[in-house]
Image (cartoon, rainbow, N blue to C red):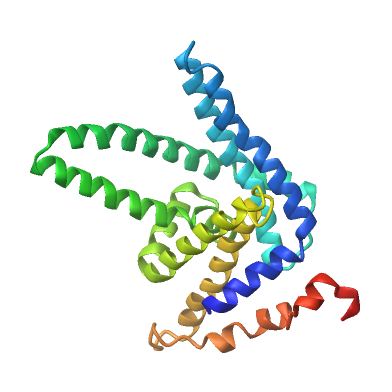
Amino acid sequence: MFGFLIKKSFFDLWDNFLPAIMVNLGFIAVLAVPLLLPSAFVSTVPAVSLALLALGVVLVFVFLGGVYALAGDITDYRSVSWNGFVRGVRSYLPVTLTFAGITLVHAVLISIGIPVYTALGNFVGLIALALLFWMSVIWLLSAQYILPVRGRLDQDVRKVLKKSFLLNFDNTFFTIALAFGAVFNGLLSVFTAFLFPGIMGLAIWYHSALKLRLYKYDYLEENPSSPRNDIPWDALLYEDRERVGKRTLRGMIFPWKE
């Protein structure tokens, strides 16, 4: 299943190469707000610098709503459009704003907690650091599902968060593998100045992962007596494999010659 996830994610991205590049360019422009603007005020007006940083982070997450809406269309083999992006920004807004807020709070807790607990220099400080570390790991792993869950399962913020954590706990090794895939996506994007695969590649990766993983739950719902570790992935993935088809390097670069 995981091998097909890699294949599907790549070809879904490749088949929408130009829209992906445009979205990635837009994301780079939005990302410049929290990365560059705060530095202009950090030495003169620190409060303005922090406000710009927080605002920039919120803008980035709001933009992600449109990205994940398009990624959902792509992974479901639908056409993408600018209107779809705008609708995604609007419809994802409650979740993206909440996601941004939690991320900012988490960053503040980390920046304050690590120095304070380290300075204690005792067993209590060590335990606190360990708790902070594992809580952060659980949050970061679960956060991978938030926007795909919003796109596929629910719109209610509380239910989205709850289902994201449940998916993490029920698919721990799969979730860790997704995180490694996301890291590889980021490293690969460095060599293309984040134009490819970039943020769209990451969104397609997560959307495809949830789309395929949900087949497991559909199957178990229809076959409640079946063992949870014996999922017939070949049968469940048949239609998607047919949609992706057999691809060659020649066909990728020169599709008109196939």
| Residue lying at the far front of the rendered structure | 191
Residue 50 in view in this figure: yes
Vertical order, 76 against 202 (above or below): below
Horizontal side of 224 relative to 253 (left or right) equals left
Q: Name which residue lies at 81% across and 77% down.
A: 251
The C terminus: image quadrant: bottom right
| Residue lying at the far top of the rendered structure | 44
Question: Residue 129 in the image: x percent, y percent?
Answer: 21, 44
Vertical order, 59 against 178 (above or below): above
Q: Name which residue lies at 41% across and 57% down.
A: 141
Q: Name which residue lies at 68% across and 55% down.
A: 196
In the depicted view, which residue is nearer to us: 232 or 156? 232
Question: Residue 121 in the image: x percent, y percent?
Answer: 12, 37
| Residue lying at the far right of the rendered structure | 256
User: Residue 241 lies in what quarter of the image?
Assistant: bottom right
Question: Residue 112 in the image: x percent, y percent?
Answer: 29, 31
